[in-house]
Image (spheres, grey):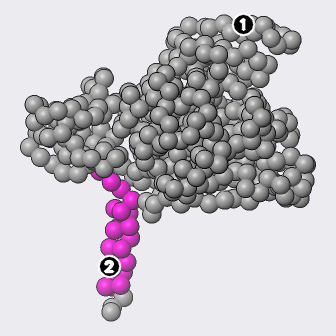
């Protein structure tokens, strides 16, 4: 083979690799406000089977007169009118999701080529702040160049999802904050709102309104101030928000009603990263503690999600609700999600006397795919001389971080031992 032919073949291989990383997607045109109907057949008399919302994309299948054939995330075929949609070529970029081992709690860091996102940052058993904040230590280790976090999402205001978050505002510029806006009368939530109010140019999105300041008043925290006024940005609704090239997030469950238990206010978010979907459940529940085979309670978050948007739940990876508790992850809900990889962020702290996850839930998940847990090495982690954050500190957390990589080659998950 001549050198010239080898060069040409090399260029062809390189071009093929480049093209393999791009895919055609169908999205609504800019003039679409509410959504485009996806129909069962390429005719206006055909039954609607789904809605393609502004900011969302579906995989392009074929070009027909007046219609595009598309593939839904659950594998079904559908058809959208060319009058309201356009085909675009998107690059399947490299994305990485980190489930940070914070002990008993949740912290998820997501990075793409042109955005970063933090979903929750809290712990029930390792709440140390500033220099000993394990989330901040982790972010500094994996992204020492990081100065800005584009999106900070607080699923709900319980300590195990919130407590480590205020320090994040001291270390990084935060551009957008997403929170249901449901007032939880705790010092932790007050500290969080103080940081949001002080962050220059931040857009604070809640479900309680938009465009004007809102005052949160606390009665149960001895510290001052008792009242905090935060300017509100565009209102948080059930909608899709662009993140960057080939990436978006969809808020599937948004509720600011003052329920007795803030778990019922958990923001459920689906990330679309390239051609993969990741579902973050926070502590969204299915009702009382029951076996996974039980149906979700009628007014639970899982039941409402199944009723309103079953097909939108389809995902490749599920970050399991409420740390693997029997209050969540009912079989009917898991059927709709269809995931084969499950992340359970958990530690040794007992919730109302129960250390999670529940064995019945883990068995159910294991029958469907691979379960990844942040607690598998908690005992030796307490005395580990090299873990993220303070070493050999007697605390759980810092050892069993989980990393999900998404690229044109596919999706891979691994445990990451990272030390300072």
Could you classify mark 2 by the number of other residues whose Cα lies within 10 Å: few (under 14), some (14-19), or many (20 or more)? few
Q: Nearer the viewer, residue 10 or 368?
A: 368
Image quarter for residue 88?
Answer: top left
Residue designated by label 1: 217
Q: Is residue 213 visible?
A: yes
152 sits to left or right of 389: left
Q: CA distance from mark 2 to mark 1?
A: 69 Å
Please state, as top left, top right, bottom left or bottom right, where the N terminus lies in the image.
Answer: bottom left
Q: Nearer the viewer, residue 413 or 342?
A: 342
Q: Residue at x 66, y 44 (%)?
A: 358
**Farthest residue, direction bottom:** 1
355 is higher (above) or lower (below) than 238: below
Q: What are the residue bounds of the magenta stretch?
A: 4-24
Dots 2, 1 in contact, CB < 8 A = no
The label number, if any, that marks residue 139 in the structure image:
none
Q: Residue at x 46, y 60 (%)?
A: 410
Q: Secondary structure at mark 2?
A: helix
267 is higher (above) or lower (below) than 316: above
The label number, if any, that marks residue 8 in the structure image:
2
Q: Is residue 243 visible?
A: no
Q: Residue at x 56, y 40 (%)?
A: 291
Query: Residue 92 appears at what percent x and percent y?
Result: 42, 53
């Amino acid at each position: 083979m001549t050198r010239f032919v080898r060069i040409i073949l090399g260029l062809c291989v390189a071009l093929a690799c480049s093209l393999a990383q791009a895919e055609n997607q169908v999205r609504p045109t800019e003039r679409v406000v509410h959504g485009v109907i996806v129909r069962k057949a390429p005719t206006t008399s055909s039954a609607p089977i789904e809605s393609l919302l502004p900011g969302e994309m579906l995989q392009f299948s074929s070009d027909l007169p007046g219609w595009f054939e598309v593939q839904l995330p659950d594998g079904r075929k559908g058809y959208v009118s060319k009058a309201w949609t356009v085909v675009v070529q998107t690059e399947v970029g490299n994305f990485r999701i980190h489930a940070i081992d914070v002990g008993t709690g949740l912290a998820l860091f997501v990075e793409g080529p042109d955005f970063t996102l933090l979903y929750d940052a809290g712990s029930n058993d390792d709440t140390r702040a500033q220099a000993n904040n394990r989330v901040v230590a982790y972010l500094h280790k994996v992204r020492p160049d990081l100065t800005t976090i584009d999106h900070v999402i607080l699923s709900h205001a319980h300590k195990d999802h919130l407590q480590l978050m205020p320090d994040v505002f001291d270390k990084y510029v935060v551009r957008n904050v997403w929170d249901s806006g449901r007032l939880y009368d705790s010092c932790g939530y007050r500290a969080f709102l103080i940081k949001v109010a002080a962050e220059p140019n931040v857009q604070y999105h809640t479900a309680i309104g938009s465009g004007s300041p809102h005052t949160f008043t606390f009665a149960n925290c001895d510290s001052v101030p008792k009242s905090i006024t935060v300017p509100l940005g565009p209102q948080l609704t059930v909608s899709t928000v662009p993140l960057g090239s080939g990436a978006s997030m969809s808020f599937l469950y948004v509720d600011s009603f003052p329920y007795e238990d803030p778990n019922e206010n958990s923001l459920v978010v689906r990330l679309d990263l390239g051609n993969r979907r990741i579902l973050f459940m926070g502590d969204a529940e299915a009702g009382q503690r029951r076996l996974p085979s039980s149906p979700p309670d009628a007014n639970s978050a899982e039941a409402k999600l199944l009723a309103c948007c079953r097909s939108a739940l389809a995902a490749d990876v599920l970050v399991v609700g409420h740390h693997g508790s029997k209050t969540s992850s009912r079989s009917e809900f898991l059927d709709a999600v269809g995931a084969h990889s499950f992340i359970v962020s958990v530690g040794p702290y007992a919730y109302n006397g129960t250390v999670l996850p529940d064995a019945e839930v883990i068995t159910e998940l294991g029958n469907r795919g691979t379960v990844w847990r942040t607690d598998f090495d908690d005992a030796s982690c307490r005395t580990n001389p090299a873990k993220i954050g303070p070493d050999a500190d007697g605390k759980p957390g810092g050892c069993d971080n989980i990393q999900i990589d998404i690229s044109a080659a596919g999706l891979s998950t691994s445990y990451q031992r990272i030390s300072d």
